[in-house]
Amino acid sequence: MTDPQFLKDLAREAGRRRTFGIISHPDAGKTTLTEKLLLYGGAIQMAGTVKARKAARYATSDWMAMERERGISVTSSVMQFEYQDFAVNLLDTPGHQDFSEDTYRVLTAVDSAVMVIDSAKGVETQTRKLMDVCRLRDTPIITFINKMDREGREPLDLLSDIEESLGIECAAMTWPVGMGKGFKGTWNILKNQLHLFSATHGGKIQEGIVIKGLDDPRLDELLGTQADDLRRDMELVEGAGYPFDRERYLAGKQTPVFFGSAINNFGVQELLNAFVDLAPAPRPRTATTREVAPTEPEFSGVVFKIQANMDPAHRDRIAFLRICSGRFTRGMKLRHHRIGKDVTIANATIFMAQDRSNVDEAWPGDIIGLHNHGTIKIGDTFTEKEPLKFTGIPSFAPEHFRRVILKSPLKAKQLQKGLAQLAEEGAVQVFRPLMGNDYILGAVGVLQFDVIMARLKDEYGVDALYEPVQYTCARFVSCEDKRTLADFERAMHSSLAKDAEDNLAYLAPSQWRLEDTQEKWPDVRFNTTREHE
Ligand code: G4P
């Protein structure tokens, strides 16, 4: 019988976890917001790391710098901090030129996300792509419209941009009074309360100014003519906007929206308070056989990302595992189901911002880093006993392609081995066209190619080059009718390839050709994602 005290602890610890990622387009203010959030959590030394990581991004041509950056990013990949009674796990979703499949996969390990939008720019391309990934799991999203201290777009215009471009309802939670030089603060719609802006007060909600609703004449004293603007705006929002609906937020259909200025620490605490209050605790996760609740006593977890470790001499990688149920304790024995082996997890990294050394246990929603010498791959499930296999860690259709050309033909074996391992790790996708002996690499972000080339040389002694190829998109192909699939394979033979796990993929030279092929083969499915086997 499971100890009732343990079950109580488990329910409490799982219930106070908030595991999330921030999605945004570069320069919207993700780094700045992350730093301010960490400051509230008292993890100041980590805040410095976030900036350092960003600075390191600019030296990407230099392999050592990349290694250094990876070192930093291992520690800042998961930032845990305590806030009020909550343990918050913020998973970094790199979103700049090092945008890669990792970015996408991290989003499969979070329970919710915060979306940062630049008030002058509105929804941008990367935001849209990340949002598509969130939609795969209906991830709940809270929106922070940043840089209100600058002249930007009208708030109502921004909300309709989000609704139209991203197909999600917006529920304003705060409302800005002016913007740029005329930015006076925000009105908290639920609390009926004014939060006055000043660049110097450090984000604290000012005490002492109590405004009782929009009709309070003190509003006019404080805001002048902008008080009437606010009243008008609020009428519009009430008439035309969506009221906040928790169920719709949790279903990923509605996003509560906050306005602020991360750099001035304005609106960040309001955001954080609402986040811990509204965002979901770890939820049940689907395995092939059943759903697994976080409060089940048996430990289970799934690997969603693999990253090279800091020390290149050791070829060590860290596998990031999200705990789905039960408790992890250092030294516990876990079953690695894909290879059917028990492993003792002695030296896992438990990501904690505070007092790392004293932490020996982790709970659902937490992330642990397992040292990995090539036996762990993305999508692997670890449990104490029950053979489970979690689903929902997809592979994404790559958008960039290169052909690999060996400098020395004698290294063909090493190239094959290197690419097989790198593909298994999820660092890149490898395609073998059905015709010919080429290796075509596919990536979601172009920086992945530099990393692969450097690692092929460093870890496998392979000197190679890239050649451009004419492909622009790949789709994983499937069809219920075997005959149609065989016909399709025959007809399209020269455009088909197998990926590292033997899945059939169609490589298209242009978007137009893809659409044309889809029209000609209506019974064939062209999938942009596929789940790891
Ligand atoms: P990112 O991680 O999403 O790429 O964005 P990051 O936080 O680095 O912010 C991008 C730029 O926007 C930075 O300026 C940052 O200072 C600025 N910024 C962030 N929040 C606000 C805000 O609320 N108001 C204003 N006016 N600016 C903001 P930078 O000049 O590119 O970098 P830095 O020299 O300040 O570091």
Image (cartoon, helix red, strand yellow):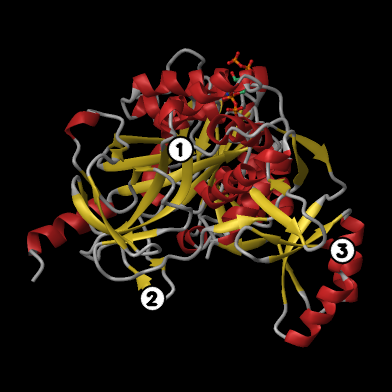
Q: Position of residue 189 (x, y in %)?
A: 50, 44
Characterize the local packing of mark 1: few (<14), some (14-19) or many (20 or more) Cα atoms within 10 angstroms: many
State which mark lies toward you, 2 or 1: 2
Q: Position of residue 345 (x, y in %)?
A: 25, 47
SS assignment at label 3: helix
Does any atom of ligand 1 lie closer than 8 Å to the CB of label 3?
no
Dot 2 corresponds to which residue?
290
Nearest the viewer among 476 and 179 is: 476
Q: Position of residue 278 (x, y in %)?
A: 40, 51
Nearest the viewer among 111 and 85 is: 111
Type of amino acid at the residue the image marks with label 1:
Leu
Characterize the local packing of mark 3: few (<14), some (14-19) or many (20 or more) Cα atoms within 10 angstroms: some
Dot 1 corresponds to which residue?
271
Q: Position of residue 65 (x, y in %)?
A: 55, 19
Ligand 1: quadrant of the figure: top right
Q: Is residue 212 visible?
A: no
Nearest the viewer among 218 and 530 is: 530
**What's the residue at 40%, 64% (across, down)?**
338
Quarter of the rendering containing residue 41? top left
Q: Is residue 295 left or right of residue 252?
A: left
Q: Are marks 2 and 1 in contact (CB under 8 Å)?
A: no
Type of amino acid at the residue the image marks with label 2:
Arg
Q: Work out which residue is located at the far top of the displayed protein and give it.
A: 200
Does any atom of ligand 1 lie closer than 8 Å to the CB of label 2?
no
Which mark, by number, is residue 494?
3
